[in-house]
Amino acid sequence: MRHYNITVKGKVQGVSYRFATLNAALKLHLAGYVKNMHNGDVYIEVEGSEENINKLISWCYVGPPKAEVIEVHAEESEIKEFRNFEIKK
C-alpha cells in the first residue's frame, strides 16, 4: 500500500478532469480524492498498489480529451487509509 500526492497543472479545470480521474481511479481500485485548486491546478491524493498508482500517474499526463496537461508532480506521503475515491469541492 502506497500514498501519493499528485498535482496536475495546465488546462485541467472545466474539462471534466475530476470526473475522469474518479473513473480512472475506480477502475484501478484506488482510494483517495481529487479536487480543484484555487490556482487552476487539480490536486489528487491516492492510495493503493504502487503499480496501479503508477498507472494513474501516467493517465494524469493525458487526462480527459479536452485537457491540456503541462506538468504532473507526484510525491509519496504517509498513508491515510482512505476507504473510497471521491471528488471533493
Image (cartoon, rainbow, N blue to C red):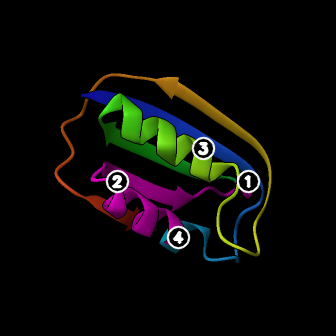
Q: In the rendering, which numbered label is found on residue 20?
A: 4
Q: Quick check: is 46 in the magenta stretch?
A: no
Three-letter amino acid code at the position of disc 4: Ala
Three-letter amino acid code at the position of disc 2: Leu
Whole-number angstrom distance, CA of label 3 to CA of label 4: 14 Å
Percent of width and height locating residue 89: 46, 68
Q: Which residue is mark 2?
A: 28
The secondary element bearing badge 2 is classed as: loop
- Residue mark closest to the camera, 3 vs 4: 3
Labels 1 & 4 near each other (Cβ < 8 A): no
The secondary element bearing badge 4 is classed as: helix
Three-letter amino acid code at the position of disc 1: Asn
The secondary element bearing badge 1 is classed as: loop
Q: Tag 4: Cα neighbours inside 10 Å, few (<14), some, or many (≥20)?
A: some
Task: Say whether residue 88 is visible.
Answer: no
- Residue mark closest to the camera, 2 vs 4: 2
Q: Which residue is mark 3?
A: 58
Task: Say whether residue 67 is visible.
Answer: yes
Q: Tag 1: Cα neighbours inside 10 Å, few (<14), some, or many (≥20)?
A: few
Q: Magenta segment range?
A: 20-40
The secondary element bearing badge 3 is classed as: helix
Q: Tag 3: Cα neighbours inside 10 Å, few (<14), some, or many (≥20)?
A: few
Q: Earlier in the sequence, mark 2 or mark 4?
A: 4
Q: Which residue is mark 1?
A: 39
Labels 3 & 2 near each other (Cβ < 8 A): no
Is residue 73 toward the left or the right of residue 6 in the image? Answer: right
Percent of width and height locating residue 23: 42, 69
Whole-number angstrom distance, CA of label 3 to CA of label 2: 12 Å
Q: Earlier in the sequence, mark 1 or mark 4?
A: 4
Q: Earlier in the sequence, mark 3 or mark 4?
A: 4
Is residue 59 toward the left or the right of residue 23 in the image? Answer: right
- Residue mark closest to the camera, 3 vs 1: 3
